[in-house]
Image: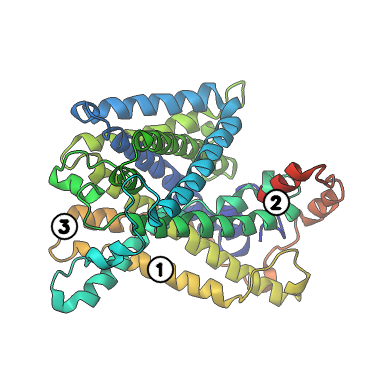
Amino acid sequence: MSTWLPLPGAIPQFCARYGDGALGFAVGWNNWYSSAITQCAEISAASLVIQYWPGADNINVAAWITIIIVLIICLNIFAVSIYGEAEFCFAAIKIVTIVGLLLLSLILVLGGGPNHFRYGFYYWQHPGAMEQYYVEDPNRADTGRFLAFFATLVNAAFSYSGVETVAVAAGEAENPRKNIPKAVRRVFWRILFFYVLGSLAIGMLVPYNDPNLLSAQSNGAPGAAQSPWVIAIRNAGIPVLDSIINVVILTSASSSANAFLYIGSRYLYALAQNGQAPRVLLTCSKNGVPFYCVIITASISLLTYLSCGTGGAQQVFQWFQNLTTIASLFTWCNICVAYLKFYDALKAQGIDRDTLIFKSPFQPYMAWISLIYFSIIILFNGFYAFYPFDITNFATAYVGIPIYFILYFGWKFAKGTKWIPAAEVDLFTGKAALDAADAHWPEQHPRNVLERAWFWLA
């Protein structure tokens, strides 16, 4: 969809243009809400990581939350001109770190660490590859392991949230019809390399019953605010490196909070541009910063102070993680619905998919499978809250559902919007100008080996 018609704020635009105006309104506000809550999750994660160091755990977590909130607000209002450069630097640090950690994992797995213990798949046998969850009866171990797998889908969806921003950037990217397909393919391989191999490495180096994992925090275990990478490094007996990795994780969480404040404020600005939010939000500073949008989005970060209450930062992080995940899943569901309507419109208007610049395989079946899969996670993600019933867990797991449908039906009834028939979907307005612009993009040719490697990577 983004290569056919690269539009700013692509997802709400596609939903409204190919499906229903109410769908575009709902997903636009859902994206803002998701970004605002994700900044809370990242701030909470950063404050949790800080507690790793001795002495920090004795300081009220509100101090760390305040420092991070003030920092990201200042960056978004007064230093937005360096936003791109800063995010590039943070991203480079993260990429170098994860590549280094994967190499370190290979060395440790083969017994090259200071303790010379050959990990291999030892922890997959002792205590085992998967822990039982919710069902502790050993006679129902398979059920417990299945529920453990299903419970991790929420964590996985949280980690993957934001991958759709590749398409969101299409309206502002250089030569989008060439670069967006390349970026999509790169995202696939980066996910496979960084996420899948990273998860495999962690599973090989850290047993699920390690006392320093996040779950130990709820029991008051000291030093529980650690990442599995840090735990693996400490268990291997490597000095100093654990603190260096923790610093990288801290900067990563802080930069993500900064990024989501930026993205959320721009979503809110786009809503105001489309007449779906008060027009006062269009007010900008002389540097072009929509400061009302920044302030309103940043005000949601005050919810992070819930970390100061019972349960602490780890419990609040899990709440925000659930809220963010459900919002992201709704966004992905909307993308699937918009694509199915786009697919039907192409078919109804006699446009052959083989003429498209980029097309995904196995459609529309993959869109239907994805829509059903995401819907199942949304509906059953809070299964653990029912027995025994826990109102807090139930609310954080399911409050996103009524929020989305209130947005959708509220706009639908207020504006009287209807679903657009496939034969009447507007596929062409604005396309001619974009087609003409394609001829003006300069062709990039690598001048040396380094540039050739960079063009392949980026």
The structure residue drawn at horizontal position 52% and vertical position 57%, both measured from the top left corner, is: 193
Asked whether the residues under the numbered discs 1 and 2 touch, taking CB atoms below 8 Å apart as contact, a structural biologist would say no
**Could you say whether the residue bearing mark 3 is in a helix, strand or loop?**
loop
**Residue 203 on image: x %, y %:** 35, 59
**Residue 344 on image: x %, y %:** 64, 74
**Could you say whether the residue bearing mark 2 is in a helix, strand or loop?**
helix
Asked if 383 appears above or below 43 in the picture, the reply is below
For discs 2 and 3, the disc positioned in front in the rendered view: 2
The structure residue drawn at horizontal position 57% and vertical position 42%, both measured from the top left corner, is: 270
How many residues crowd mark 1 within 10 Å: few (<14), some (14–19), many (20+)? Answer: some
The residue at which mark 3 appears reads as: 390
The kind of residue on which mark 1 rests is Ser
Residue 119: numbered disc: none
The residue at which mark 2 appears reads as: 456
Q: Earlier in the sequence, mark 3 or mark 1?
A: 1
The structure residue drawn at horizontal position 69% and vertical position 56%, both measured from the top left corner, is: 182
The structure residue drawn at horizontal position 38% and vertical position 50%, both measured from the top left corner, is: 324
Q: Quadrant of residue 382?
A: bottom left
Asked whether the residues under the numbered discs 2 and 3 touch, taking CB atoms below 8 Å apart as contact, a structural biologist would say no
- Of residues 199 and 259, the one nearer the viewer is 199
- Of residues 84 and 354, the one nearer the viewer is 84
